[in-house]
Image (spheres, helix red, strand yellow):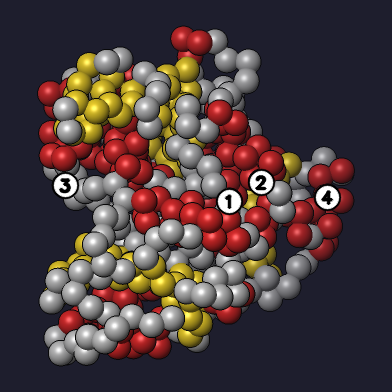
Amino acid sequence: MKYNYKKEKILIFGLGITGISCLNFFLKKKIFPKVIDTKIFSLQKYIPNFIKCHFGSIKKSWILKSTLIIMSPGISYKKYPIFNEAKKKGTIIISDIELFCREAKSPILAITGSNGKSTVATLLHKIISSYGYKAKLGGNIGIPAMNILSKKNDFYILEISSFQLENTYNLNSFASTVLNITQDHIDRHKKMEEYKEKKMRIYQNSQFCIVNLDFPCLFPKNRKKKECITFGKYKGDYCLKKKENDLWITKKRKFLLNCSETKIFGICNYINFLSVIAFSDLIGIPHNFSLPIIKNFLGLEHRMQILNSNNGIKYINDSKSTNIGSLIAAVESIKSTGFLHILVGGISKNADFSCLSEFLKNRNCYLYCFGVDGKKISNFFPNNSYYFHNISKAMKRIHKIIKKGDIVLLSPACSSLDQFKNFQERGKKFVYLVEKYKHKKFKFIKNEK
């Protein structure tokens, strides 16, 4: 279907890099939308003077007069009643992903989930492009989808968040997956059921659904068996199996790759590999090509990144951890003979940390809680946690009690935006603090409460 935007009264609500990418798309078509953002950004310099803009507040008259609104993924239209009023008048509200899908001509491989999206999308892109296809990667991974729109392309690989799926209706992907689901963004979606419903939208009109059987609630309804390819920890078309003392990646009982030979560790990563193989198999990329790339994949920064250790102490940077599920996955993948020192905190997004009590009950670990919700998190663990204003003070405390054989894990399970620009900046701060303390002589003392 071809869309005629020249007849529309278009409003871009929310600037940022996504809003700019949508604006540039329309400008190339000689279409001049209006722009609203409730904040005042330095990105205003990228907007031509002839574009009508309003910053710092809502401009209701512009919203009500618009026929098409492209909503920034960081903003929920439900927060502002005026958008419901506009919808009742016939205004269509869409995401940048919906706009992209209206224009994209090449097959889309769509990936969502609470954790692992960027890892899967990046690795899949590496395999497909290395095989010789023209493939472009974008979406929630930091490259706006509208910036990768191209006529000469074989595949699009999109990482898509629940925020983007909220206003996406015609994805029509070749293949899609919900990698997993865990408690996240409850501050926006209010209930887990609503969060799940947004994630499941990725399967609508998808030619193939790649489904994780470890999460039965994520199985798409009313889909034919041949349209669903399954994977999971120990069940599915693609799953993990023991062979002698090793864990292997398998496809329908065929042993493909020994997990011990991969460069990154952890059950969560091995399960991510299963989904990557499922995607690449659908495209027709042979295992003798895809498996060596998976085997040598080094992972992404700030995701279970092992830093150089001193004095028998290991440091792990998992700053990308922004929900409880990712923290649990991180802890489960670690084997330690000493104590585990976990740095947790930031903006909790209304997550319920009480569920961690049972999980951590019999583990030799201490929690060092920091940030805006650090004290609230610490209260869930009165016997084995400390509260600090920031990560620097927490690391200073760890430095005083750490001993040989211990592991320090930054896996915050929270958003970083209370004290950092993003999770990358938080991870870099941790790396800096590790470097700061590892060159000093450690004072080994008995672990105390």
Going by the image, does 138 lie left or right of 437? right
Viewer-side residue, 110 vs 114: 114
Asked which secondary structure carries label 1, the reply is: loop
Viewer-side residue, 397 vs 151: 397
Q: Is residue 97 above or below residue 186?
A: above
Asked which secondary structure carries label 4, the reply is: helix
In this view, the mark in front (3 or 4)? 3
Identify the residue position indicated by label 2 in the image. Answer: 192
Residue 346 in sight here: no
- The label on residue 183 is 1
Q: Where is residue 4, by image quadrant? A: top right
**Amino acid type of disc 1?**
Gln
Q: Where is residue 366, by image quadrant? A: bottom left
Identify the residue position indicated by label 4 in the image. Answer: 84
Q: Residue at x 48, y 14 (%)?
A: 227
Going by the image, does 401 lie left or right of 11? left
- The label on residue 170 is none
**Amino acid type of disc 2?**
Met
Q: Residue at x 47, y 74 (%)?
A: 384
Real-space Cα separation, disc 1 to disc 2, in angstroms: 7 Å
Residue 386 position in % (x across, y down): 48, 81
